[in-house]
Image (spheres, rainbow, N blue to C red):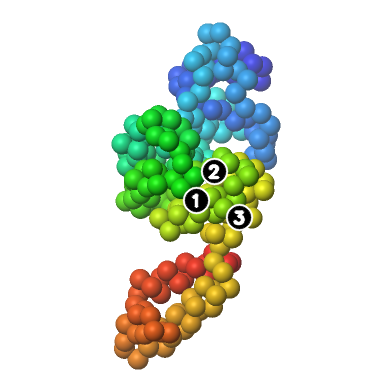
């Protein structure tokens, strides 16, 4: 098919300009896409592609028998980083099936709000809490916390990661490889935490088999929410 034939066929099918077309060979392998065509004057791609869907176009299937699919395999990661974004964060979190998690951007957020981004980051507490709550209400994964921009300050980087972890974030964005170890040490459970989780689960399952749903382990009260948290701890090690 020539470019002209493809464009003409897409126009005849009234394909919207927010559609990404992927051309495949007979065995289904992708061999090209319509993205380079979007700037062609007079084509259905004028104005660019926004929120693309996918149309699979097997090479030898005649026009009119095109199979159209939503590009559900492409995850979107919205970064909430303005006052308006925080105000609308519940709507953003629930905006679609391709949004699996949110992230928070402290730099732009503090700039937008006229806040001073301090090393202690107390000014971020309300916004962070809003992002975590919206994620939970929408039923998506816990969010990712903002980057930390001082590459020489590992102490406050660790503190920032620890605060985010304690507030319900599942991880933290990094802007330099040297930050990865510090962040990983914060979000990954320690050997002591893993051992404690294993004790909690084992003791609770034994008590549960005997008809009890609340016990004490090492002086701590353990019931279903504590066991579920212990199970999440062990899941991080897999």
Quadrant assignment, res 210: bottom left
Real-space Cα distance between discs 1 and 2? 8 Å
Position of residue 88 measured from the top left corner of the image (x, y, whole percent): 32, 36
* Residue receiving disc 1: 160
Q: In the rendered image of this protein, does residue 141 appear above or below residue 110? A: below
Image quadrant holding the C terminus, namely bottom right
Is the residue marked by circle 2 packed among few (<14), some (14-19), or many (20+) residues within 10 Å? many
Provide the secondary structure element on which disc 3 rests.
helix
Would you say 228 lies left or right of 49 here?
left
Quadrant assignment, res 1: top right
Real-space Cα distance between discs 2 and 3? 11 Å
Q: Give the numbered dot on residue 148.
A: 2
* Residue receiving disc 3: 182
Q: Mark 1 near mark 2, Cβ–Cβ under 8 Å?
A: yes
As drawn, the residue found furthest toward the bottom would be 210
Q: Mark 3 near mark 1, Cβ–Cβ under 8 Å?
A: no
Real-space Cα distance between discs 3 and 1? 10 Å
Would you say 67 lies left or right of 222 here?
right
Q: In the rendered image of this protein, does residue 47 appear above or below residue 22? A: above
The residue at the point 34 percent across, 45 percent down is: 126
Q: In the rendered image of this protein, does residue 82 appear above or below residue 97? A: above
Q: Nearer the viewer, residue 188 or 163?
A: 163
The residue at the point 60 percent across, 51 percent down is: 154
Q: In the rendered image of this protein, does residue 163 appear above or below residue 233? A: above
């Amino acid at each position: 098919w020539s470019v002209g034939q493809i464009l003409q066929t897409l126009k005849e099918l009234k394909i919207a300009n927010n559609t990404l077309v992927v051309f495949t060979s007979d065995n289904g392998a992708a061999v090209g896409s319509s993205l380079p065509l979007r700037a062609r004057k007079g084509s259905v791609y004028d104005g660019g592609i926004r929120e693309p869907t996918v149309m699979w176009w097997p090479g030898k299937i005649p026009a009119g028998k095109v199979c159209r699919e939503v590009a559900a395999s492409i995850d979107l990661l919205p970064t909430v980083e303005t006052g308006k974004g925080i105000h609308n964060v519940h709507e953003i979190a629930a905006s679609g099936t391709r949004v699996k998690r949110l992230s928070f951007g402290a730099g732009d957020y503090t700039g937008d709000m006229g806040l001073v981004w301090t090393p202690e980051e107390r000014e971020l507490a309300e916004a962070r809490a809003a992002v975590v709550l919206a994620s939970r209400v929408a039923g998506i994964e816990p969010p990712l916390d903002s980057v930390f921009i001082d590459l020489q300050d590992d102490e406050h980087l660790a503190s920032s990661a620890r605060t985010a972890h304690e507030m319900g974030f599942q991880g933290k964005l990094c802007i330099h490889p040297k930050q990865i170890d510090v962040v990983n040490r914060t979000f990954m459970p320690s050997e002591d935490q893993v051992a404690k989780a294993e004790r909690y689960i084992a003791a609770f399952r034994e008590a549960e088999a005997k008809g009890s749903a609340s016990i004490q382990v090492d002086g701590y009260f353990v019931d279903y929410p504590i066991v579920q948290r212990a199970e999440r701890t062990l899941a991080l090690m897999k």
